[in-house]
Amino acid sequence: MTEPVAYLNKYLDNSTNITRYKPENQRLLSSNPLYTAEQLHPRVKMTQAEFDEFNEYYKRLNNLTAVEMLDNYFNFADMPLLLDSEKFILPIANIWEKFNPDNPEETIEIVPDMKWFVRSKRASNFGNYIYLKKIESDDKVTAFNLKSVAEQFDTQEEAEKWTNPLTEAVQLPVE
């Protein structure tokens, strides 16, 4: 949660004011947060792949208003990540006209792609974990010290099927 950027302050003499910082005043009756910087300037969270799709979509249609963009939104079947999730429709419409391709971090936050892994509960003396790697033939498993070659799961339930008392399912960013 981000810190508030404005407070509504009420004083004992029934006066009120708005300040950027929570005042420390003996006459203060209450000080309530109004909003956070994130609420004032919302950013859409996307993985790098989702952002790449959005950027391509924006390049094709940047001359449209947000309403016109929404009319065309479902016409682009080559945008599977954006079209696959309804979580993007309203946020994209909200940032569409504010988006600046030269400064995308103002409206879009790139988040790491997260997957589930099965790894040892304890790290080695060198701080490394041992990760599970399934071998497709006969559903055998082996262990690797490198997360980059480890088996990745989309859900926690899938990963937990492969755990044992010495391992755990953890969600980590994909490199």
Image (tube, rainbow, N blue to C red):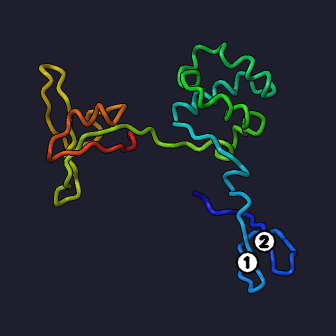
Tell me which corner region of the image, top left, top right, bottom left or bottom right, holds residue 168. top left
Quarter that holds the C terminus: top left
Q: Measured along the vertical axis of the image, is residue 105 above or below residue 1?
A: above
| Residue drawn at the location 78% of the way across and 71% of the way down | 9
Question: Residue 74 placed where, x, y %?
Answer: 65, 16
Question: Residue 39 placed where, x, y %?
Answer: 69, 51
Q: In this orientation, which residue lies closer to the viewer: 45 or 49?
A: 45
Mark 1 to mark 2 CA distance (whole Å): 8 Å
Q: Secondary structure at mark 2?
A: strand
Report the amino acid beneath label 2.
Asn
Mark in the foreground, 1 or 2: 2
| Residue drawn at the location 71% of the way across and 81% of the way down | 24
Question: Residue 90 placed where, x, y %?
Answer: 68, 31
Quarter that holds the N terminus: bottom right
Q: Measured along the vertical axis of the image, is residue 140 above or below residue 10?
A: above
Q: Is residue 43 left or right of residue 132?
A: right
Q: In this orientation, which residue lies closer to the viewer: 121 or 46?
A: 121
Report the amino acid beneath label 1.
Pro
Q: Earlier in the sequence, mark 1 or mark 2?
A: 2
Q: Measured along the vertical axis of the image, is residue 19 above or below residue 112?
A: below
Disc number placed over residue 173 in the picture, else none = none
Count of numbered badges drawn on the protein: 2
- Which residue is denoted by mark 1 in the rendering? 23
Q: Is residue 117 left or right of residue 83?
A: left
Q: Are marks 1 and 2 in contact (CB under 8 Å)?
A: yes
Disc number placed over residue 9 in the picture, else none = 2
Q: In this orientation, which residue lies closer to the viewer: 162 or 69?
A: 162
